[in-house]
Image: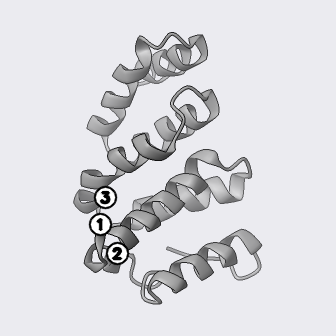
Amino acid sequence: MTLNPANSYHMHFKAFLDAISPDLVTDPSAVAALPAPQADRVIAEILSCACQATHASLIELGRDAAASLPRPWLLERIEGIADRMLNYDDDWEYRCLLELYERLDASLLSRLITRGIDSPNADIAEAAQDFSRSR
């Protein structure tokens, strides 16, 4: 993961990671060796950046950080953490999560699309249909 020292969002994210383990910035795979509560905090922060932020730099930082983690390890954990912290009835968060999952794994994306297709929230159903058509 490449962080820009001139970007305050990046430096805040680096400080967060350094507080958990100073190795994470240079070796994102080290997250897999962390105790579960700490590893879950890393994933939650990444989801917050990628799905709840509104600044493009922060969203891309979250997506890049997620993509830098060990994929099988991340895929075992990310859905459960996303379920606990994200609002699937918020079309911004839902669309951002679709975009993140699209980058990470086709099965993960498919499950999220299926979840949204029958949503009573028209914006969520529309987002799911948009992603379903684009696949």
Residue drawn at the location 39% of the way across and 73% of the way down: 38
Name the residue type under label 2: Val
**Label 2 Cα crowd, 10 Å radius (few <14 / some 14-19 / many 20+):** many
User: Where does residue 118 sit, x and y in percent of width and height?
Assistant: 41, 11
Q: Quadrant of residue 9?
A: bottom right
Residue drawn at the location 67% of the way across and 50% of the way down: 53
Residue 31's disc is 2
In the picture, measured across the screen, residue 119 lies left or right of residue 16, that is left
Residue drawn at the location 36% of the way across and 34% of the way down: 109
Q: Are marks 2 and 3 in contact (CB under 8 Å)?
A: no
Q: Are marks 1 and 3 in contact (CB under 8 Å)?
A: yes
Q: Are marks 1 and 2 in contact (CB under 8 Å)?
A: yes
Residue 95's disc is none
**Cα gap from disc 1 to disc 2, whole angstroms:** 8 Å
**Cα gap from disc 1 to disc 3, whole angstroms:** 6 Å
Q: Quadrant of residue 60?
A: bottom right
